[in-house]
Amino acid sequence: MGVFIGRQPIFNAQEQVVAYELLYRNSEKNSFPMVDPDTATVDVLVNSFLSIGIDEVTKGKPSFVNFTKNLLMDTTLDYINPSRVVIEVLEDVPITEELVQRIIELRKRGFKVALDDFVMNENVHIYNELFANIDYIKIDFILTPLAKRMEIENNIKTHFPSIQLLAEKVETRNEYEVAKHSGYVLFQGYFFEQPQVIKSTEIPANTLQYFQIISLLRDEEPNMDVLAENIEREISLTYRLLQLINNSSKRTKSKVRSIKQAILLLGLTELRKWIYLLAMREINVNIKDDVFIELMRASLFRAKVCEKIARVNYKDNFSEYFLIGLFSLIDSLLKRPMNSVLRQLPLSENIVETISGVDTEMQPYLQFSIALSKLDWPRINELAEKLNIPSESILPIYKEVKDWVADAIVFNP
């Protein structure tokens, strides 16, 4: 049986990943809501530290993990390195003197502590002692009423400035900006997958050239002469393509005498992958934040899932399905409105409409890829039935695509 862990990045105000929240995930359909909270946390810890390895899961960054009252009070934490885990006290844990004393004890051992989905209760009189021993407070930015949010924010900023406020479930760029203005320093949610409009600038010419080549590559058998001609127009791309050939196992003793020959040696599948990554490198020259990398992973994951499901359904134009996933987050990558970006790309009408949210025949494929990336099982199962995807093949597809994305995200080809 496979081992799964949900991992959601936590960003700072510079949009850099500073930690991850680790979430219980299971290979069984619709299992997450039914799992006992104690079991869920133990599984997350066992899978992270023993089965997969915490370094691989969090890449050396701290991990936020939910803890119930039972697990806070027992010996589970005796076997965990305090530098690797931030203890999230779940919202249903009663705030008592016993809890405060346990938190004090855990912090003396080196643990950092967060209050999850926190809302102040006027009947509780030990907040001052509690807050004096807390490192983070996580607030649901969507469900917490504004008045309740402001009550917590003002209290912390005035009396406990060392506590870091973390805004959870930030879904839009506007909510992210509001949270920053309100004093939050950490952020969690899907805001980076939403359209972002920061400034109106044109896509750099060389990046647009890459995208034009990607458009040519959407055909299963593209016109090689036209493809070679477009690549030759961009000297840096020509140079990198030859570098790829030189470092490839397909390198031959004979010299490469043309770009067309180089394309044939490398192969269209590899070329499709590297052209997109090189295009993203052009954009990334002056962008060093981790949001960009997470968006890259999400884009590639969606693209590969769309392509695989299109193949399962015997779609001849499976390369177009790849492009739907690939460009579904391009507005966030370029920090420009989607319609402004799409106007500059020579994509088919079906692709443009699907990415724009029109209910096309391709739309369920994109929806499935998004649901799979979040392991949203109710939505996955609903769409899998619609797309004729056998339930037993879903997890193998997930693992295969995750591995492919991990291999693809390389910024020094």
Image (cartoon, rainbow, N blue to C red):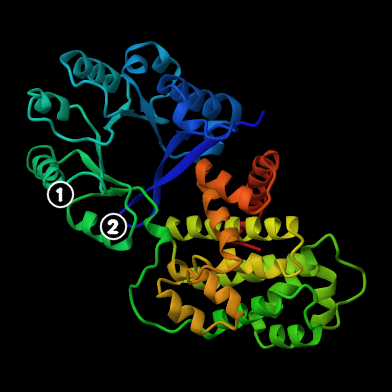
Picture quadrant where residue 175 is located: bottom left
- Determine the residue located farthest toward the right in the rendered image: 253
Looking at the image, which residue is at 60% across and 83% down? Answer: 346
**In front here: 285 or 273?**
273
- Determine the residue located farthest toward the front in the rendered image: 386
Q: Is residue 328 above or below residue 88?
A: below
Name the disc covering residue 146, or none: 1
Q: Is residue 368 visible?
A: yes
Instruction: Look at label 2 and name its amino acid.
Output: Tyr
Q: Position of residue 382 (x, y in %)?
A: 56, 47
Q: Is residue 289 visible?
A: no
Q: Would you say 343 lies left or right of 122 here?
A: right
Quarter of the picture holding the C terminus: bottom right
Residue at mark 2 = 176
Mark 2 vs mark 1: give the one in front: 1
Q: Earlier in the sequence, mark 2 or mark 1?
A: 1
